[in-house]
Image (cartoon, helix red, strand yellow):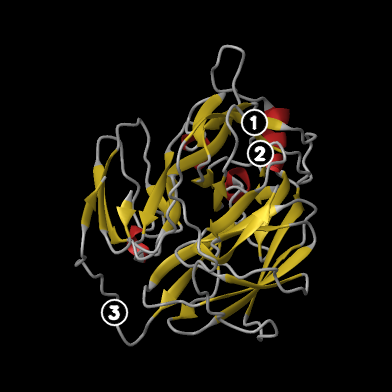
Amino acid sequence: MAKKGDTLVVRVQNNLTEPTMVHWHGIRLPANMDGTGEVQKPILPGESFEYHFIVPDAGTFWYHSHQNETVQMERGMYGGIVIEDETDPVMDNERVLVLDDMKLTSNNEFKQHGPVGQWIERHDGREGSTNLVNGKEALTLHMHAGQSERWRIVNAASARYFKLSLDGKPFKIIATDGGLLEYARTETELLITPGERFDIVVGPFEEREVFSINSLPYNRVTMLKAKLQKYATVHVMERKESIAALPGKLTEIKSLAPQDAEVNRKVKLSVDPSLKRIIDFRVNNKMHGMDKPVMVGDLQVWEVSNTSLMDHPFHLHGFFFQILEENGKAPEYKAWKDTYNLKPRSTIKIAWMPDNRPGKWMYHCHIIEHHAAGMMANFEVINPLNPVTEKQESFHGCHI
């Protein structure tokens, strides 16, 4: 946990038997701190690396391995990050709920696959039957009647889509990837795809209520049939006075561009036949390709299309974007996003501004197996007038 404007200094010591590195998902940091192979040498076994960067935005973020992710993330190399601000709504309690699942054998060992299983996992992404909240199975949460809590939810799963339900009880959505929404939205269901974050307000509830935190079936077009998944149980205890205060307007989000803004880049996600691997996952017909550079200060309006017959969560490193339209329709509300789900045969138009953080960046599908199989591209942000300058000063300091 840190405060907006803090400088985070994180020394990563690699005690694994293989290289690793850490990506800071959603944080607008310098390119050389992004934790990818394009900007950093992997941290070799026995070595260490120090990440240091200012956290300029309040919100719910997370970190995870960006080396051999299908193995290292599956084994738990991730965690949530909370960046607070003085203007945050006051709640009675806050929780960070990091969601994941694991595919285990009957002996609770990580399951290995033969050729057929490997192909299915490459196609679908890895989904397991052991559901985790903060690394624990069948978690029980306790909260007091009459109180309201802020739950910061991170979907850290390799491929599991989490369609949140609290046994039908309503909750309020107050924030997503890039921080607060302008106005709270009352819902009973919420789709959270891999890599996404949502903050919700739950409660108040009555004494002795018991309900489940579930993931409802969502058909993202895989070989396995979606079914109800239970993650945790909530028990409501004795009543306590509440100090929670949720203002009518949470923040102001200024639009970057109108819905009809001219597109200056097209990005196509596709799943194509392959003689060697049966299918390939591609961006603009390339696997792990290099896209054209963008210039600092040059507004980007991208058309991102999913030509395949399955869902793909699109993730842009290092920058927030706004959805201008999805399949020709304007979104219901404004939000800052870094991860957004593209349904089969769908197209979104996004707008984002490359600020003065030149260097190499990437975008990719956040189903980890699809990313590994090729659905990723790099690009460079260029400022020909000024070299990158990394500010080291901050009002606070925070070490992890």
The mark that comes first in sequence, 3 or 1, is 1
Question: Looking at the image, which residue is at 48% across and 30% down?
Answer: 135
Residue with the mark numbered 1: 211
Residue with the mark numbered 3: 387
Task: Pick whichever, 115 or 161, lies toward us.
Answer: 161
Q: Secondary structure at mark 1?
A: strand
Question: How far from the left and from the top, in percent, is residue 169?
Answer: 68, 42
Task: Pick whichever, 109 or 251, lies toward us.
Answer: 251
Q: Is residue 368 left or right of residue 224?
A: left
Of badges 3 and 2, the one in the foreground is 2
What amino acid is at disc 1? Phe
Question: Looking at the image, which residue is at 50% across and 42% down?
Answer: 147
Cα–Cα gap, marks 3 and 1: 54 Å
Q: Is label 2 in contact with label 1 (beta carbons under 8 Å)? A: yes
The mark that comes first in sequence, 2 or 1, is 2
| Vertical placement of residue 128 versus 219, above or below | above
Question: How far from the left and from the top, in percent, is residue 292?
Answer: 54, 75
User: Callout 1: few (<14), some (14-19), or many (20+) C-alpha neighbours within 10 Å?
Assistant: some
| Vertical placement of residue 366 versus 110, above or below | below
Q: Secondary structure at mark 2?
A: loop
Task: Pick whichever, 214 or 210, lies toward us.
Answer: 210
Q: Is residue 150 left or right of residue 259?
A: left
Of badges 3 and 1, the one in the foreground is 1
Residue 187: image tag: none
What amino acid is at disc 2? Leu
Residue 166: image tag: 2
Q: Quadrant of residue 163?
A: top right
Q: Quadrant of residue 332?
A: bottom right
Q: Is residue 288 visible?
A: no
Q: Is label 3 in contact with label 2 (beta carbons under 8 Å)? A: no
Question: Looking at the image, which residue is at 57% across and 80% down?
Answer: 255
